[in-house]
Amino acid sequence: MKKEKNQYLGVYLKGLLMGICDLIPGISGGTIAFITGIYERFINSVKNITPKNYFNLLISILKFNKKEIKDYMIKFDTIFLSVLFIGIITAIISGANLISYLLENHKTLLLSFFVGLILASSITIQKHIQNHNKKNILFGLIGFLFGFSLFFIVPQNISEPSIFYLFIGGFIAICALFLPGISGSFILLIMGIYEYVINLVKNITENFIYLIPFGLGAISGMYVISRIVSWLFKKDKSKTLYILLGIVLGTLIIPLNLAYESSNYFSEINILIGSILLFIIGFLSGYYLEKKIIKKNHNSSFSK
């Protein structure tokens, strides 16, 4: 029981970190899911939640069929997903004000840490690739060019988005959560509704009704993208991982540019030193997490 509690505490903390990253333009929560070793489990759990399965679960609950309820709970990986999403939502609701403050006052230092973390994640993804042939590397290059091209899209600014536009924003932003390297917050920035959505979250009790179309878009996006990514993994995992690796490396230009624009390294030596230190700390944190997860998986396999 204690071991299970510790396991789900770890899932909650991973959700918190994913949620924090989703608040920062240029940083992807999906990258954190990959570093922490829960990416494929996350994808497959969400993929199993179909309208048909959900309807059958409701019927089982009404019939009070304990066996069927338990089977569906296992199929949905309910506890894992619930704890993870509670962590993500907790971070987004409680961290909106903090992240806004840090981005406004310490953007360079904050982004430097996460750039190091992202770079470590690219090593993690590379280690999961089994086939390194020229064709697969070409897919990595395509992913890199796609990720890099996002840098040239000029962000818009929409003060009063329509309900449909909020729905589309939620749909695309949640798709980015499932793709390491693509930042949901940066997508919202490009669409011109990042500040609008952040302000809604800051005062969620007053603005909850305005978040409904955004939330419905996010639910629809989860349903679609989880199936696409799961299918790609089954079709050719190495090519899919190369594309994701390329996207991660290509989109690094976005937080690097945001960090550079927010500070003059050459006139502020303390910012330069702090940025280098936080970059190293971020990289080592990601590297340590990856090593710890590999060791944990090795020990659990050995014990079996």
Image (cartoon, grey):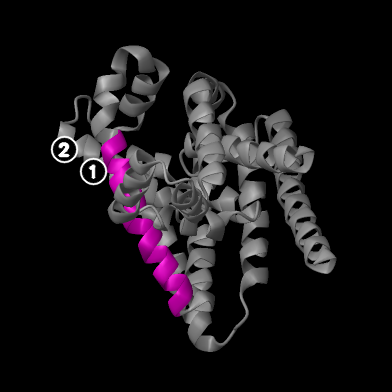
Q: Please identify the dominant SS of the magenta region.
A: helix
Which quarter of the picture shows residue 281? top right
196 lies left or right of 275: left
Which quarter of the picture shows residue 274? top right
Q: Is residue 241 visible?
A: yes
Q: Furthest-top residue in view?
A: 206
- Vertical relation: 283 (above or below) 157: below
- Vertical relation: 114 (above or below) 253: above
Residue 202 in picture, x, y percent from top left: 41, 18
Q: Secondary structure at mark 1?
A: helix
Q: Is residue 192 visible?
A: no
Between residue 219 and residue 270, name the one nearer to us: 219
Residue 197 in picture, x, y percent from top left: 33, 28
The range drawn in magenta is 215-235
Q: Residue at x 43, y 59 (%)?
A: 147
The Cα atoms of the two marked residues, 2 and 1, are separated by: 6 Å
Quarter placement of the N terminus: top right
Q: In the rendered picture of this protein, how many numbered marks are placed on residues?
A: 2
Which dot marks residue 168? 1
Q: Amino acid at mark 2?
A: Phe
Between residue 30 and residue 103, name the one nearer to us: 30
Residue 280 in picture, x, y percent from top left: 75, 46
90 lies left or right of 156: right
Residue 116 in picture, x, y percent from top left: 67, 48
Instruction: Identify the residue under disc 2.
Output: 164
Q: Amino acid at mark 1?
A: Ile
